[in-house]
Image (cartoon, grey):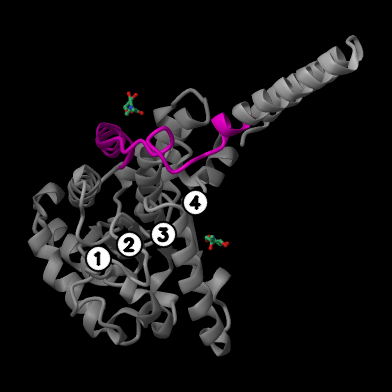
Amino acid sequence: MKAAHLYVLLYVCSTAAALVDAFDPLTATLVIGAGATLGRKIWNYFQESCDSKWIVHNATGLQHDLETKLFGQHIASRIVLKAVSGFVANKNPKKPLVLSLHGWTGTGKNFVSQLIAENIYKEGMDSSFVHVFTAELHFPHSNQIETYKSQLQHWIKGNVTNCAHSMFIFDEMDKMHPGLIDSIKPFLDYYEKLDGVSYQKAIFIFLSNAGGESIIETALNFWRAGRDREEIELKDLETRCALSVFNNKKVSGFWHTSLIDKNLVDFFVPFLPLEYRHVVQCVLAEMEAKDLEPKKSVAEQVAKDLVYSPKSERVFAVKGCKTIGSKLDYYM
Ligand SMILES: *[C@@H]1O[C@H](CO)[C@@H](O)[C@H](O)[C@H]1NC(C)=O
Ligand SMILES: *[C@@H]1O[C@H](CO)[C@@H](O)[C@H](O)[C@H]1NC(C)=O
């Protein structure tokens, strides 16, 4: 509930209280009663609930946001739109939607999760139906893994019981204990009901850097061959991405589990490393978001001062668009 809403509520209540003083006891009781009912109605009106008033499923909005706010990610943009709009249009999905977002830091994985949330829930990331879990924050101690497992299962069950259209975002999936990933597997599967609860309308989004290196390699090969980045297709990345997620035991997590071999992940979404021109776009968008006058020269300066790799060719921004928000204050 927003502060403004609370003020309305307080105002109504205090007005009711002021009126009460002016009347005899019976009228006062009636006024208080009416006030309480009205108060409750106002409260309910502003309280987020699990219905179409708060869950908007705006596929048009998502398309618009992906096209205008996300830069340099033609593949991710297409997959996410197709996956999400298809899923929300389906009245009887057979399993929850499971997306796995892969790529280097700062390429837009968190941002895309946010865009999805904003176009599904009126309250966006602030919705009480959106749950974000971060390995290092929520599950930091590997010796407490058994506690975390049952806690996480309880949460997910409780959250989905509360609202079938719940969304779960797992950040830093590659740092997540394999046992923990295993413990959420049943929720992702094709079960009609699990212990009386259906998870089929929920959305799970996994974010990780796993596979990032091989995505960069592919993008770099295209760049060196003088080919247009937009020519990169999913099939150029897909097998490599899945395989490196699979095979690289150093990037712990995924392959210990059967998320992949059981096909519980519906879509692997690769995020390409960002080039100078994309960073410029990010900075300009950030200026606009901050109500600053977009200045191309400043945006170019911010982008120029970032670190690029590989060292010799300076093609991709090492941190993508990640830190530009705070950098911008320094340049303006
Ligand atoms: C969906 O998004 C579009 C574009 O952002 C917006 O104009 C429209 O009002 C939204 N519709 C709903 C139902 O929120
Ligand atoms: C839902 O998940 C949150 C964590 O995001 C947890 O704190 C909360 O207790 C859960 N709700 C229920 C009803 O289990």
Q: Which residue is mark 1?
A: 192
Q: Is mark 2 within 8 Å of ligand 2?
A: no
- Badge 3, how many Cα within 10 Å: few under 14, some, many 20+? many
User: What's the magenta region?
Assistant: 43-70
In the figure, residue 55 lies in which quadrant? top left
The label shown at residue 168 is 3
Q: Amino acid at mark 2?
A: Ser
> Do the numbered discs 1 and 2 sit on residues whose CB atoms are within 8 Å?
yes
Q: Amino acid at mark 4?
A: Thr
Q: Which amino acid type is marked by label 3? A: Phe
The quarter of the picture showing ligand 2: bottom right
In the rendered structure, the answer to whether residue 330 lies left or right of residue 105 reads right
Q: Position of residue 168 (x, y in %)?
A: 41, 59
Q: Are marks 3 and 1 in contact (CB under 8 Å)?
A: no
Q: Which residue is mark 4?
A: 323
Closer to viewer: mark 2 or mark 4: 2
Quarter of the image for residue 89 reads top left
Give the mark, 4 or 3, whose residue is nearer the N terminus.
3
Q: Secondary structure at mark 4?
A: loop
Q: Magenta includes 47? A: yes
> How far is the residue under mark 1 from the one under mark 2?
6 Å
Front of the two marks 4 and 1? 1
